[in-house]
Every structure is written in structure tokens, then in C-alpha cells.
Amino acid sequence: MASVECMNLMEYVEWTLPREAESLLHALALNWGDVVDAKQLEINPLKGAMTNEVFECIWKTRKGKKPRKAIVRIYGEGVDLFFNREDEIKTFECMSRLGQGPRLLGRFPSGRIEEFLHARTLSAADLRNPEIAARIAAKLREFHELDVPGSREPVLWKRLRAWLRTAKDLCPKSEAVEFQLDCMEEEVNNLEKFISRKDQRIGFCHNDLQYGNIMIDQEDTSVTIIDYEYASYNPVAFDLANHFCEMAANYHTDTPHLLDYSKYPGFEERQRFVRAYLSSYGEEVNDSEVEQLLEDAEMYVLANHILWGLWGIISDHVNDIDFDYIDYARQRFQQYNLLKCLQFNV
């Protein structure tokens, strides 16, 4: 969809944005006081979202000041199968209070309006930059240490089983056979027994730390983690594993679903990240701590592939976004089977 410059808000809302967003955007612009015309704005759809539709809204201001901006997020179809929207909003508001992300500026039935952060979203290539990677590691450690209200019980295994039930309910028999869904519960049970340990670090995890959910301030290079739809308490090793897996993806190409596992970070790159993570509070870190967390993360890569493979199967049946969810799921399960053979010698 092409960007629309200086279009009357009412005309654009009828075409693209839900009507309920109009009064919120108008009131927001009026409240700022320095906007030239609250109903005249530029709206740009932002690329890369796989669940929601996201738009940047820009208003001209008086006396040559910087334009005012806000983000409109329209929720994707079927997301209630993955997480509770009210819980996600509570997390979003909590993150705002803790100074961890954008403020919530307004809500409407099918979406919300968020503060525009004057920072850029990372690219796939940014994740390989050692300086940026160290900042991400430190920010992730900070995120994991947040005191977020709610149960501290990890949700990973419950979520895996819930998504497996949903995938079985939605997909045709041929698809269930292809992905061996009837055997998947046993896979999940065995994996939980093998990699769960009582002494593992548990923290408030993002659970979807792809580059599009990380922003960097171009002046002070500070990092902000955004979009908390899947956030919950979990083993921190799972979050590290998720981030490493996302290095195989580039969602800003003509084939955004394709994954390139030759880009999965090598041992030394993962080691640097884990060491930066553990030492970010100034502690002395010994090699055994680094090795243990690295080992745990590699085990949780297996759970990561199952989780996002199931996500792909479900999304294919409930979401109309132009993304080949089924082939994405196929790649995740193929990688799971490959790694399982290497990890367990089967």
C-alpha cells in the first residue's frame, strides 16, 4: 500500500483505518496544540509485521518544529488463539510505567495508538554488529530482571501444548500427517523432561526477540525492546535461543518467510552475546556460567522450533497477511528434526 500524504483523515479512515481510530487521532493531535491541522496528516504503512498492521501517522507542526508522530497498530485476525489481548495490554502499560517502551496513547476495539519512538527499528544485519549485539544483550538482561505483576510460573510448556491442540483443531488431516502432529505431544513431553532444570534462571521474557521488535536511538544508541504480545515468565535460555534463531530470518525481502540457517550465529558469536548478557550488571562472570547458559540456550532452540512451527500452522488458517506461514512452519520443523538428530544422536 502506498503512503498517503496530507490526506483528510476522514477520507483515509474510511478506506484503511477503523473509524474508531479517527476521534482518538484527532483528539491526540488537538491535545498537542502545535499541530497545524489535526485532520491533515500523512499515513505510512510500516512493513515487516507478520501479525498486525502497523501505520505511522505524521502531523505538520507550527513554526518549523519537528512533526508530531504516532503509531497505529491494528490487531491481526486470530491473535486471540495465541495470547490474551487484555493481558498483553496490561503488560504494555506495565512496560510503559517501567520506562521500557512506548506509552499507550489510546485504544479502540481492533487496535491501539502508541507513542512514536524517535529511534529506528533494527535490520537483520544490525544483529551481527558486535556493538549493537552487546547493547541488545544488556537490554535483554535488564528486561529479564523486570518485576512484572502476575504468576512467575513459566508458560512455555503450557503454551506449546495449547498451540498444539489448536493446530490439530484447525488443520486438515493431510497437514497433520505432514507435520506429524499426532506424535508431537510425546515430543514436547520428552523435551520438557530432558531440558527442564530446577536451577535454571527464570525471568520476564520477551519470547519474540526478532530484529523488528528492537529499536535503537540514533543519537545515544540506547536500545528499546517493543511489542510484548508473547511476553511472559520463562527460562531466560529460551529467550536467548529465540533471539539466536531469529538471526536466520530477514522479513524485509520478497520472500520474508524463507529462513537461512547458515546465518545462525556460530559458537564464538553466541558466546560473546551470553558473556555480554551475564556481565551487563558489572558482575565477574566465570567460564562455567557462560558455558552452562550457552548449553541451555542450545537445548531451548528445539522448543523454539516447535513453538514457532505451530504458530505458522495456526497462522496459515486464521491470518490473511501476505506471508507463507505453512512453508515457514515446514522450515521450523525441518530444522527441529535436524537438530534433534544431532543433539540426541537419533
Image (cartoon, rainbow, N blue to C red):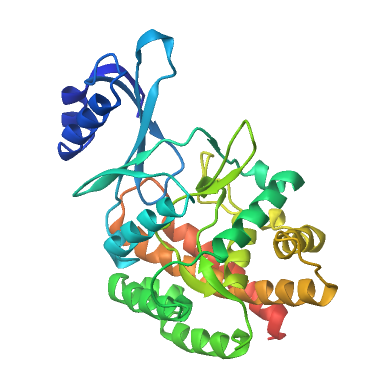
Q: Position of residue 155 (x, y in %)?
A: 44, 77
Q: Which residue is painted at 41% across and 84% down in the image? A: 182
Q: Which residue is painted at 25% across and 28% down in the image? A: 31
Q: Position of residue 234 (x, y in %)?
A: 51, 74
Residue 9 seen in this snapshot: yes
Asked if residue 324 is positioned above or below residue 313 in the image, the reply reads above
Left/right of residue 211 with respect to residue 75 in the rendered view: right
Asked if residue 155 is positioned above or below residue 71 in the image, the reply reads below
User: Relative to the observer, which residue lies in front, 231 or 68?
Assistant: 68
Left/right of residue 197 with respect to residue 81 in the rendered view: right
Asked if residue 57 is positioned above or below residue 294 in the image, the reply reads above
Q: Position of residue 219 (x, y in %)?
A: 62, 31
Q: Which residue is painted at 20% across and 37% down in the image? A: 21
User: Relative to the observer, which residue lies in front, 290 or 333?
Assistant: 290
Left/right of residue 325 with respect to residue 16 in the rendered view: right
Quarter of the figure that contains the C terminus: bottom right
Locate residue 239: give its quadrant: bottom right
